[in-house]
Image: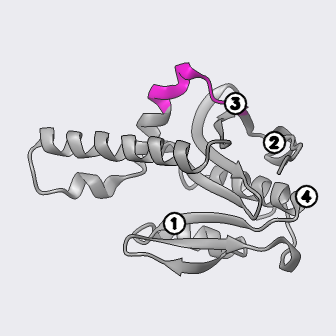
Amino acid sequence: MSAEVNFSTLCHDLVLRPAKPTDAPFIEGIYHSARPDLLLIDGSPELIASVQQQQWQVMTMGSGENNPNAMHFIIEKQHSQLGVVMVDFGHQEVRIIFLAILPQARGQGYGKQVLQGLQQAAQRVGCPLAAVVWQHNIQAQRLYRELGFAPQDSGEMANKWLWYPARNKVFVGAG
């Protein structure tokens, strides 16, 4: 499914620019910051670092194999990097593979703006918007629920949440 979407107009004061190879260290750092559960491993710092690296490799390889057409964006405000979003416009759904904001920028509405922009894009292509949310991430679950998502499939560590455009109105910049 092809979708012509101008993300800069969907996110108001945020810019979503395509990620470049030079963004890889930033993306990996954001991933590690979004996985505080890995720091709870009972082991040496070397073991924890090894598991973090393995999980990063699983995420990057898995997203590449399962979503080869995924688009990777850097979220910026006034040319400062704030986060990362990876999204795939598939045949049946628009799937958020990964969305994370820098720890110091969380709670300021940036993730909400990006999600609202993605809702608007999903509305345009007429597909549901899907995301997997970690069960321990209560703040993210609250945000997804506020934006009209509902949990669909429960997993051991995370749940799939869906938003259906036909049942929802999108208010970009609201709230």
Crowd around label 1: few <14 · some 14–19 · many ≥20 (10 Å): many
Of tags 2 and 4, the one toward the viewer is 4
Residue indicated by mark 3: 18
Residue indicated by mark 1: 133
- For the point 81% across and 60% down, the residue is 122
Residue indicated by mark 2: 7
Nearest to the observer: residue 79 or residue 51: 51
- For the point 87% across and 63% down, the residue is 123
Q: What element carries label 3?
A: strand
| Label 3 vs 4, first from the N-terminus | 3
Give the CA distance from mark 3 to mark 2.
10 Å
Give the CA distance from mark 1 to mark 4.
24 Å
Give the CA distance from mark 3 to mark 4.
20 Å
| Label 2 vs 4, first from the N-terminus | 2
Disc 2 marks a residue whose amino acid type is: Phe
- For the point 19% across and 45% down, the residue is 48
Q: Would you say the magenta stretch is mainly helix, strand or loop?
A: helix
Residue indicated by mark 4: 124
